[in-house]
Amino acid sequence: MPMRLDEGWNQIQFNVADFTRRAYGTNYVETLRVQVHANCRIRRVYFSDRLYSEDELPAEFKLFLPIQNKTRTSVPT
């Protein structure tokens, strides 16, 4: 499955049932384990019965972008 990641935090949604059906021609039953390698940082992994919109997700599941603080430097007159 081709995947592209941007710099910083990314939110990945992976349809395991669809991938299993397309790749192996069988139905998805269960996930026994998830292996994460040390060269990445993960905030959360969760499974759901369907794809939820951003508005339906709890606040702790949302990906918030950092706020850019634009400070102005004043020049003395």
Image: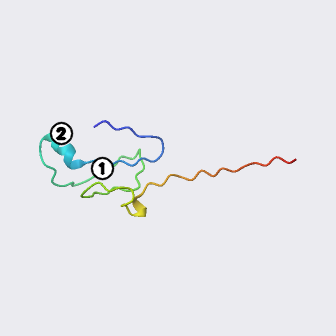
CA gap between label 2 and label 1 equals 19 Å
Within-10-Å neighbours for mark 2: few <14, some 14–19, many 20+: few
SS for callout 1: loop
Tell which tag, 2 or 1, sits nearer the viewer: 2
Residue 72 screen position, x and y as percent: 72, 49
Outermost residue, left side:
26
**Taking 31 as reference, is 62 left or right?**
right
Outermost residue, right side:
77
Amino acid, disc 2: Ala
User: At x 12% / y 41%, what residue is drawn?
Assistant: 25
Outermost residue, top side:
2
Residue 76 screen position, x and y as percent: 85, 48
Tag 2 residue: 23
Tag 1 residue: 35
Residue 74 screen position, x and y as percent: 79, 49
The tag earlier along the polypeptide, 2 or 1, is 2
Amino acid, disc 1: Gln
User: At x 45% / y 48%, what residue is drawn?
Assistant: 9
Quarter of the N terminus within the rendering: top left
Residue 27 screen position, x and y as percent: 13, 49
Quadrant for residue 30, please give it. bottom left
User: At x 82% / y 46%, what residue is drawn?
Assistant: 75
